[in-house]
Amino acid sequence: MPSRADTVRMQARSVPLRKSSSDDAFVGLINLACFVIGVMTPLSELLDRVSVGGLSPLLGLASALAMLGWWRGVRDRTIIRYFGWATLFTTAAVISGVAAGPRSFGSSLDLAWWMLVLIPGLAVVVSDTKARRALLAGLLSGAAVYLAVSTARVLQGAEPIDRASGELNRRLLGQNRFAVDRAVVWLVPLMLVRNGFPLARTARWVYVIGAVIWTAASQGRTGAIGLVLGPLVVAILAVGREERRSQKRVLMLAAVVAVLFVALSNVSIPGFGASERLENVAAGDLNSSDELRILLLKKSTALAMAHPFLGVGWGESFTAYDPIVETAKTPRIRQGALTTHPHNAFVEVWANSGTFALIGWIGALAVPLLAAFRRAQFPEVRALAAGFAVIMVGIAFHSSFGSDLYLVITVLLGAVADPRYALPDET
């Protein structure tokens, strides 16, 4: 028979340890920091102007949490796979930066910090459900500010984007439409999926209606496509995996996409200016902005083809010269082609740092998305995967390497690394 001392020890092992108040306070601080990062990311134009040297509050908080994540340990297989592809991407970017000169090299090191340190470290932190929900709550709060300001301006009969100097509205909305779309539209699927995020139904629909008002009034084509694409991906992922694999399902999906493309390209929706802009482009009725974007795409592709291994240097495709710019129809378009980003993040990576960088970039993006597709039965993952897909399509029409894009990757990577969503073959 066990002695009394052995019995006491056995009972002690069977009683779960309680977290101390200091542990609870530490967890609370982490969640608060995640919320603050979430709020600051979409509102960085307003809140992120204060900095000490090159360190902004957003970067400082993100770096601190990333270090905490690395201290806990990066053990999830999906995060490790992401890290491998990101290493290929950033190695190629740094090498191209070294070849291009000090300015490009410095930019490539900044890229490497985000891709190899901040994203994996933060993903570990937000793989905890409460921390991730706090971050998402912050992102939704920041995006709601955009929606509140833009909706108020529309109701007042004003343009949703105000470029008048010195006004608060300019600091919030006086920028390109896609900057707001990134903050607003990619979160719409989270509002459409039941149990995707703990929020009252009324609040969800208020958010969705605000997003529709913003997109209609701003006439943003990418935002309009995102509003259609997000719910479509949600619906596709809601279907069982085996059914998605069937040829019949693939053919049906192709038909739906074709119909949507034709509808968006050739039918004007009253009050929805983006559809008219899409129709004009499809008909070949291009304005100067469209002409510039096409020339930028041609220029960047030409640079990539001329420098397939090293590119022209990370961040240098903006000002790099190629003879194709001489085909510009006006001097203004020519000048824009020599000073503007390529308006396609994938071609930008290719032109900046070569083919290996592009392969690594696509691989790093594909890892969390494919992992999310495998976990599509979980509502939150399904919603975040749809939002991620919206952004991936969006950056094919825009250049975007700001903190908001990195956070999009981080949130999905953290979600698929959440132990609650582990699949049977991964436990």
Image: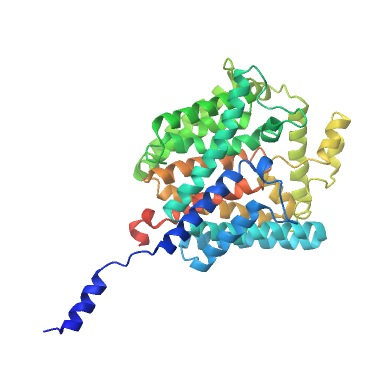
The residue that appears at 60% across and 23% down in the rendered structure is: 152
Is residue 252 toward the left or the right of residue 61 in the image? left
Is residue 421 toward the left or the right of residue 61 in the image? left
The residue that appears at 75% across and 44% down in the rendered structure is: 300
Q: Quadrant of residue 116?
A: bottom right
Decide which of 33, 112 is in the foreground and name it.
33
- Determine whether 329 is above or below 276 in the image: below
Decide which of 191, 236 is in the foreground and name it.
191
Q: Quadrant of residue 53?
A: bottom right
- Determine whether 299 is above or below 120 in the image: above
The residue that appears at 50% across and 26% down in the rendered structure is: 209
Q: Quadrant of the N terminus?
A: bottom left
Q: Quadrant of the C terminus?
A: bottom left
Q: Residue 137 in the image: state x and y as whole percent.
A: 49, 43
Q: Residue 46 in the image: state x and y as whole percent.
A: 67, 40
Does residue 12 appear in the picture of this structure? yes
Q: Residue 266 in the image: state x and y as whole percent.
A: 59, 20
Query: Which color scheme does this rendered protein use?
Result: rainbow
